[in-house]
Amino acid sequence: MLYVKAFFLVLYCSIAKSQNSTEQIISSESIKDVVIDGNQIFKIDIITHDLPEIRLQSQIDGEYLEFFQITKTIKNGAINIQLEENPVISIPDDKRNAHKVVAAKLLLTIPNGLNLNIVSDIGSVSLTGRFDVLSIQLLEGFCEIEGTALKSTINTIEGNISIKTSKGKVIAETRYGKLALASFNNKDEVWRLKSINGDITVTKKN
């Protein structure tokens, strides 16, 4: 029994050392825009709710996780979120490329009807809920959305775009991928979707 307890203690310490998880709750009363610099964040999940608060959860894994953290700043009605070097710990010169072996995830819960702007080099994005203006620019990752938005501009290079919504005018273009687009009677909202290599799919949500 003692050996079993020791094994699980070592396992727990190993897992704790290999992960850096944080959670914050932020008042959203003055916030209209959520801006995410998603470079080196490989997974970005966002859902909306009816509460006047933003719940920010992050997880960083990897050999050099202690050198990085996901930070936020609030200014002029916008919350800006990004992955940055930890100011408390200096990165040695021989570890300057440490971000290449760090895996960062971001999970946000935000109020309905905010503007959302995301740019990422490696990240994939999953959104669920009701948004105002969406602007998403992805290099390698895919984009999945289930919900509504007044105006949306979504561009990918490699990744697929998948939209499940109940209304909107869809303007879509892909150079080397495939298109599968539903048509809606209610065209009050606008979805502008563009990809180079990815497929674009729009389906109806009941």
Image: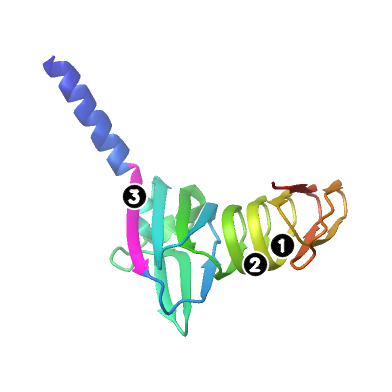
Q: Is residue 91 left or right of residue 3?
A: right
Residue 88: percent from left, percent from top: 28, 66
Q: Which mark is residue 134?
A: 2
The mark nearer the N terminus, 2 or 1, is: 2
Residue topped by disc 3? 20
Q: Which mark is residue 91?
A: none
Q: Which mark is residue 154?
A: 1
Residue 151 in view in this figure? yes
Residue stretch in magenta: 18-26
Residue 84: percent from left, percent from top: 43, 65
Instruction: Please name the amino acid that badge 2 sits on.
Output: Leu
Furthest-left residue in this view: 2
Give the crowd class for mark 3: few <14, some 14-19, many >=20 residues within 10 Å. some
111 up-or-down from 181: above or below: below
Instruction: Please name the amino acid that badge 3 sits on.
Output: Asn
Q: Residue at x 83, y 49 (%)?
A: 182
Give the SS element for disc 1. Answer: strand
